[in-house]
Each structure stands twice: as C-alpha cells, then as structure tokens.
C-alpha cells in the first residue's frame, strides 16, 4: 500500500459550490445527496465542498453540516445474527429505514439540534450520536453508496433536494479500496479478495443508478482542476 492510493481533498469548482449554495435560496433547510461507488472519493469530495460552503453561506461553518450514510451500518453483532458479516457494505447491511427517518428529522426539525451516528473506521463500527446538526444549519450534505436505490431506500431520494453522482476511473477506485482495507487491518491478499467479491458487485449496483442523479461529477476532472 502507498499513500498515493488514497484521495486528497479536492478544490471543488466554483460552479459546484454555487449550485450547492443555491439550494438554500428558498430559506428552508436543504439536503444535498452525494452518491457514488465504493472508493469513488465521495467523502473527500464532500469535505472539500463543505469547506468551500462554510465560507460562502451566511452563518459560516455552522451553516453547513455533513451527515454520512455510513453511520447506519448495522453493527457486527447484528450482521452475525443475520448471517451478513461476509457482505458488510452491501445494501442489506445498512439500516435504510433508520437513515431515511434521520434525514426526515434533519429536514423538518430545524428548531433543535438533531444528532446523527457516524462510522468509526478504526473499529469498523457505527457510533451513535456523534454528529450534531444544529438549528443554524441551512444545508446538510449527506453522502453514501445507495441514495438512489429503490426498495427500502426509495424514501431517501424523496427527502433530498438534489443528488449528485460522483465518478472516478475504475483503476484509481479499486486501488484506493485495496489501500483502505489494508490500512484498516486486512492483508493485501485479503483486501484484493474483498474488493473483488464484495465491493465490486456493490459498485456495479451503484453505477446503474447514475442516470437517476441530478448531476454527474467526474472527480478525475475535479482533481485536475485542483
């Protein structure tokens, strides 16, 4: 593994920052979804976007919040009980209904702080109540793999003002995934096997939802701009 395999936070183009900022123009709290395949760079893209928005929106950093879908991973204890531990990261290993319920609260409960779970990669487990969405937040950015799926995920799309689909070339994406798995404890061979048997089928599923997004963003182009 080399550090080069992990994505750097990009400089997000002004037109994307302006498009996100415009979502709060009506005065109502807006929710922006960012979706993409595993390893596509969603989290680092959102980090750059949130940083840029903090200097663009009235209210500063508190005006924008980041609520990842990953906090709704089922804990390993639940996955073991369901026989899904070997598929961790697949759609059925998340609490989709709980995620939709949290987004519904985030959108409507603007007079009080709403707490959301995070995902702690050091222990590979969700962490309850780790993210605060304060009343002053005007835009909430949520990111994950399955925002555009149907079935139990369908309610998620209905709650989002817009959804952006981020893409990166497959060779880079796979290299990042292998590096990530090694970083968090797998051997190189275990990481390669996990990417092939678990991550790649999930990526294929996510890629089929790209046409449903409001905007497709090539992170190859964004990184070149940065």
Image (spheres, rainbow, N blue to C red):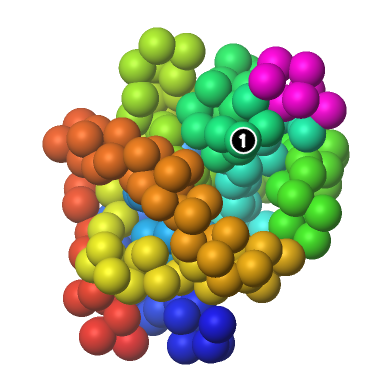
Q: Which residue is drawn at 21% across and 35% down?
A: 208
The location of residue 89, given as percent across then percent down, is 56, 39
Q: Residue furthest top?
A: 151
Examine the image and state in which quarter residue 101 appears.
Answer: top right
Identify whether 6 is placed above or below 4: above
Inspect the magenta stretch and tell me whether residue 15 lies in it. Answer: no
Using residue 33 as the reference point, say whether residue 207 is left or right of it: left
Q: Residue at x 35, y 17 (%)?
A: 150
* Observer able to see residue 45: no
Q: Residue furthest front?
A: 189
Number of marks in picture: 1
The location of residue 148, given as percent across then percent down, is 34, 30
Q: Is mark 1 on a helix, strand or loop?
A: helix
* Observer able to see residue 185: yes
Inspect the magenta stretch and tell me whether residue 78 lies in it. Answer: yes
Quadrant housing the N terminus: bottom right
The location of residue 212, given as percent across then percent down, is 20, 32
Question: Closer to the camera, 51 or 190?
Answer: 190
Quadrant housing the C terminus: bottom left
Q: Residue at x 31, y 34 (%)?
A: 205
Q: Which residue is drawn at 24% across and 85% down?
A: 224
Using residue 151 as the reference point, say whether residue 117 is left or right of it: right
What residue sits right under mark 1 in the picture?
Answer: 86
The location of residue 216, given as percent across then percent down, is 20, 52
Majority secondary structure in the magenta region? helix
Identify whether 149 is placed above or below 3: above
Q: Categorize mark 1 by other alpha carbons within 10 Å: few (<14), some (14-19), many (20+).
A: few
Using residue 125 as the reference point, say whether residue 194 is left or right of it: left
Query: Where does the magenta region start and end?
Result: 77-83
Using residue 169 as the reference point, say whether residue 192 is left or right of it: right
Q: Which residue lies furthest to the left in this view?
A: 211
Question: Closer to the camera, 19 or 120?
Answer: 120
């Amino acid at each position: 593994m080399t550090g080069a395999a992990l994505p750097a936070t990009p400089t997000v183009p002004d037109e994307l920052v302006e498009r996100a900022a415009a979502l709060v123009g009506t005065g109502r709290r807006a929710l922006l979804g960012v979706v993409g395949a595993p390893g596509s760079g969603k989290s680092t893209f959102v980090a750059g976007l949130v940083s840029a928005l903090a200097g663009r929106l009235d209210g500063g950093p508190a005006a924008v919040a980041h609520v990842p879908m990953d906090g709704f991973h089922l804990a390993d204890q639940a996955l073991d009980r369901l026989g899904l531990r070997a598929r961790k990261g697949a759609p059925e290993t998340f609490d989709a209904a709980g995620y939709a319920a949290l987004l519904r609260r985030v959108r409507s409960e603007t007079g009080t702080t709403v707490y959301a779970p995070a995902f702690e990669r050091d222990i590979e487990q969700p962490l309850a109540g780790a993210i605060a969405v304060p009343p002053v937040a005007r835009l909430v950015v949520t990111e994950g793999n399955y925002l555009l799926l149907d079935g139990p995920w369908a309610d998620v799309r209905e709650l989002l003002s817009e959804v952006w689909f981020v893409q990166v070339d497959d060779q880079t994406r796979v290299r990042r995934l292998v590096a990530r798995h090694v970083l968090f404890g797998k051997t190189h061979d275990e990481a390669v096997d996990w990417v092939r048997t678990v991550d790649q089928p999930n990526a294929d599923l996510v890629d089929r939802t790209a046409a449903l997004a409001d905007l497709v963003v090539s992170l190859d182009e964004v990184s070149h701009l940065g």
